[in-house]
Image: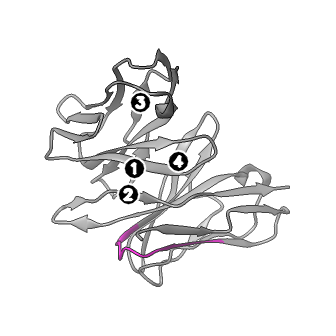
Amino acid sequence: KQEVTQIPAALSVPEGENLVLNCSFTDSAIYNLQWFRQDPGKGLTSLLLIQSSQREQTSGRLNASLDKSSGRSTLYIAASQPGDSATYLCASHNTNAGKSTFGDGTTLTVKP
Amino acid sequence: EAQVTQNPRYLITVTGKKLTVTCSQNMNHEYMSWYRQDPGLGLRQIYYSMNVEVTDKGDVPEGYKVSRKEKRNFPLILESPSPNQTSLYFCASSSYLGGSSTEAFFGQGTRLTVV
């Protein structure tokens, strides 16, 4: 059974700092890994999708990497802003039976 | 606009009264899925469907039913709701292309309270 772990569970940084969120998974048989943002009480907004054959994806200040061999993905946020404050979730879409597995998330607070 | 629409957004019901939460997507996606989100437990998959008439259990299927009679719709049915099904529910959809799957789109969520 796939297990997805996110570290740290919470992170507080001053505005302008670069930061890295970590996601690890136990089963490398995945279609893709996706990073989401969730604001309190709201739905999930897709940030980046990395297919299993890809190594990284970039969108604006965000860069996500994927290393299937080590079972790890990272989300890099450059020049953080208070508006980046949210919970960030990673999820694997598994080739084994087509299930999806989410990590518990990292709650990010960016202080002005 | 590409979207996944869930209804209702909020629902308070009583134990044992059957209810259905609807989910519809306008992107012609093959894959649809239901999740529940609970504090301290994260997002857990309830059921998923890889295409019309094809459904399978996720990690927490007990007490739920689904059907996929049309590609765009994937309703979640609670035949006899219980208080432990109080949760925030999300529907999602994505597509399969050439052996990989595309970005998953999520609905806005349904907050269900069972008293």
Above or below, A59 against B61 in this view is above
Callout 1: helix, strand or loop? strand
Q: Earlier in the sequence, mark 4 or mark 2?
A: 4
Q: What residue is disc 3 on?
A: A5
**Magenta stretch bounds:** B21-31
Separation (CA) of disc 3 from disc 2? 20 Å
Residue B22 magenta-drawn? yes
Q: Label 4: few (<14), some or many (≥20) within 10 Å?
A: many
Separation (CA) of disc 3 from disc 4? 14 Å
Q: As drawn, is A107 to the left or to the right of B31?
A: right
Does residue A105 show up? no
Q: Amino acid at mark 1?
A: Ser
Q: Amino acid at mark 3?
A: Thr
Q: Position of residue B80 (x, y in %)?
A: 75, 67
Residue at left offset 42%, top offset 44%: A36
Q: Position of residue B38 (x, y in %)?
A: 63, 43
Separation (CA) of disc 1 from disc 3? 18 Å
Q: What residue is disc 4 on?
A: B44
Residue at left offset 86%, top offset 55%: B115
Q: Amino acid at mark 2?
A: Ala
